[in-house]
Image (cartoon, helix red, strand yellow):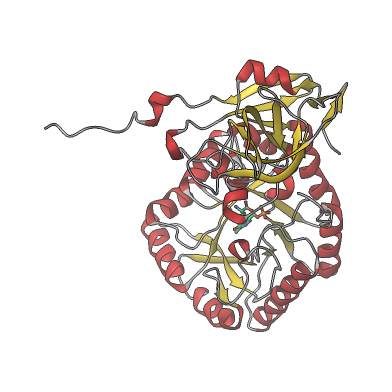
Amino acid sequence: MDHFHYHDNTLWAEEVPLPEIASRFGTPCYVYSRAMIEHQWRAFDQAFQDYPHRLCYAVKANSNLAVLNILARLGSGFDIVSVGELERVLAAGGDPGQVVFSGVGKRADEMHRALTAGIACFNVESEAELAHLNDIAGKLGRQAPVSLRVNPDVDARTHPYIATGLRENKFGIEIDQALEVYAHAVTLPYIDILGVDCHIGSQLTSLSPFLAASERVLALVDQLAERGIEVRHIDLGGGLGITYRDEAPPSPQQYATALREKLVGRNLEVWIEPGRAIVGNGGVLLTRVEYLKHTPHKDFAIVDAAMNDLLRPALYDAWQEIIPVTISTDGKSHLFDVVGPVCETGDFLGKQRHLAIGVGELLVARAAGAYGFTMSSNYNSRPRAAEVMVDGSKAYLVRERETVESLYAGESILPE
Ligand code: LLP
């Protein structure tokens, strides 16, 4: 279901032509489709059918308040990794009782805030963190709800920077040591063990690593039960991939159905933390061509978006589809490197792309709804882009473009 579609040779988001968005809000700008985001969330939800489940959307993928609010209205839970993400969820009307807190480096103040907000579960990643959380919960006179994140040593077969479930990664507790850590955890007075958690990586394009990880987690659940430690849920993290180019990842339906089969006959809730698969294809980055530069070796389309706006190509050599907003009728295309104004050779959105475009025309980078704006920065003192949410025939500005003044508003010069 693609709500970014051509109509009379012009690209639209739902019922709004993108040139209209560019003239109203300027470029570069992120454009999201409410219908696409909702469709993906519902696809996961419906695929679990009546099996008890909880979807905790991974806020890091796209943390705009409008996105969080749309998901909160559907009844979504949230996976957070910082107090900043927690405050966003609360500001967007999310239910703290459906929030899980992941991450290897939770600080004392973050644990404190999450405990007082009443989150559903801390996904604890080490023994040291467990002890720290027990302390902080004790001072508050509360029980901290906990799952231990185990590292199942499964190869996610994805980009090494985003594979997290291998023994050499910093994440989780080695699965072979997990029994011992659980046995200790249940003796801690302010820790309430609820479940087992894992997350093996991101942009996974086949089911087998998920199934291998879930088998290992379920084997651990059984071993725990033998020792009298009953858990109520397993959390299998996020990671389901999307199509950027020619990947053919399982659909949310196929993914959820396969997991459900592993869980038949068990009295265990399943929690998952999808990010990219919910918002990735529901957003584009809209940008305007500033210059065309022809050299004897190469042609460059220099656009007004850069690596500070969309870091994935520069950081992971990620391929994002780049398409024109208006299809040229004379159809003469050239091979371009689509690059931004930032002073780095790594500043590109795409290389060697066939495009029929002219100066002043609009392009979009597709599949930019996840890890697009959230990974943007002010590098080269570039204000961050505006964000727009399209809902049917309406387009709403859901984040103002930053002003230049705001870039240094918190800075000061020495008195002498
Ligand atoms: N849960 C945990 C504990 C995670 O670390 C992540 C992602 C997720 C859930 C959500 O994973 P997803 O469903 O979105 O794959 N910046 C990279 C992706 C980094 C993912 C980090 N962790 C990229 O642009 O590809």
- Residue 362 visible in the current orientation: yes
Quadrant of the drawing holding the C terminus: top left
Examine the rendered structure and indicate whether residue 333 appears above or below residue 161: above
Indicate which quadrant contains ligand 1: bottom right
Q: Is residue 236 above or below residue 297?
A: below
Task: Measuring from the top left, give residue 303's x and y in whole percent.
Answer: 61, 32
Give left or right: position of 366 versus 316.
right
**Picture quadrant of residue 289:** top right
Instruction: Describe residue 284's horizontal placement relative to residue 129 as left or right.
Output: right
Nearer to me, 377 or 140 = 377
Taking the image as shown, residue 344 lies to the left or right of residue 40, namely left
Q: Is residue 189 visible?
A: no
Nearest the viewer among 5 and 33 is 5
Residue 319 on image: x %, y %? 70, 50
Q: Quadrant of residue 282?
A: top right
Question: Camera-side residue: 182 or 344?
Answer: 344
- Quadrant position of residue 226: bottom right
Residue at point 52%, 67% (across, down): 125
What residue appears at the point 46 percent right and 72 percent down from the top-left corner? 188
Q: Quadrant of the N terminus?
A: top right
Q: Position of residue 329 (x, y in %)?
A: 86, 23
User: Please, is residue 191 above or below residue 360 in the view?
Assistant: below
Percent position of residue 388, x then y: 65, 26
Q: In the rendered image of this protein, does residue 376 appear above or below residue 269?
A: above
